[in-house]
Image: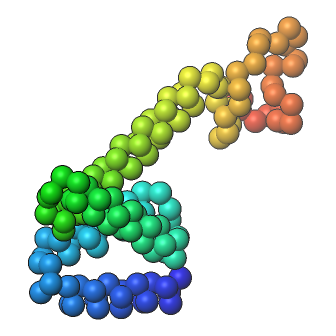
């Protein structure tokens, strides 16, 4: 991870220095930050983030060139806009998935036993079977 991190910093520094004069400050930020931020929403390991950011950036360039050609718009602004739009689409999708997962988990009935959660079971028919299997008699009772 350390070598990948250092390689990434070196590549970012080289790209930033060489591209400021070519495309301007705002486009450099849009081209560098949006694909990487999009990748971070989906993966956590640095080498995978780098590859995913390359993929998102490449897709934004290809679609941006096509949209720019078809609708006669500024190419660099179209690519940057699609890159940022991709970030917000992935952010919305991941937020929706997280919300649905939390909603599903809150709908499952559970009961707290100790420090772990177990599915809620029907009431026992005999008072001596009130504790779940595997829990010693003294745990969970006030002394």
Quadrant, the C terminus: top right
Viewer can see residue 84 = no
Q: Quadrant of residue 140?
A: top right
Q: Is residue 81 above or below residue 106?
A: below
Specify whether 58 is left or right of 28.
right
- Residue drawn at x 42%, y 72% is 54
Give the side of residue 41 with respect to residue 69, left or right.
Answer: right
- The one nearer the camera, 30 or 106, is 30
* Image x and y of residue 125, in percent: 86, 8
Q: Nearer the viewer, residue 63 or 103?
A: 63
- Among the 4 quarters of the image, the one containing residue 134: top right
Image side of residue 96 versus residue 112, left or right: left
In x, y percent, where is residue 39? Answer: 42, 63
* Above or below, 28 relative to 136: below
Residue 30 % position (x, y): 22, 67
Which image quadrant for residue 61?
bottom left
């Amino acid at each position: 991870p350390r070598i990948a991190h250092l390689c990434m910093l070196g590549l970012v520094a080289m790209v930033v220095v060489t591209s400021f004069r070519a495309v301007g400050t705002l486009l450099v930020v849009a081209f560098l930050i949006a694909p990487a931020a999009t990748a971070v929403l989906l993966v956590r390991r640095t080498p995978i983030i780098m590859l995913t950011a390359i993929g998102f950036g490449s897709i934004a360039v290809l679609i941006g060139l096509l949209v720019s050609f078809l609708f006669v718009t500024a190419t660099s602004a179209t690519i940057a806009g699609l890159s940022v739009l991709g970030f917000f689409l992935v952010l919305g999708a991941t937020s929706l998935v997280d919300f649905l997962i939390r909603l599903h988990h809150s709908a499952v009935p559970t009961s707290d036993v100790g420090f772990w959660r177990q599915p809620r079971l029907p009431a026992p028919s005999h008072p001596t079977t009130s504790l779940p299997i595997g829990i010693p008699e003294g745990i969970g009772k006030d002394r």
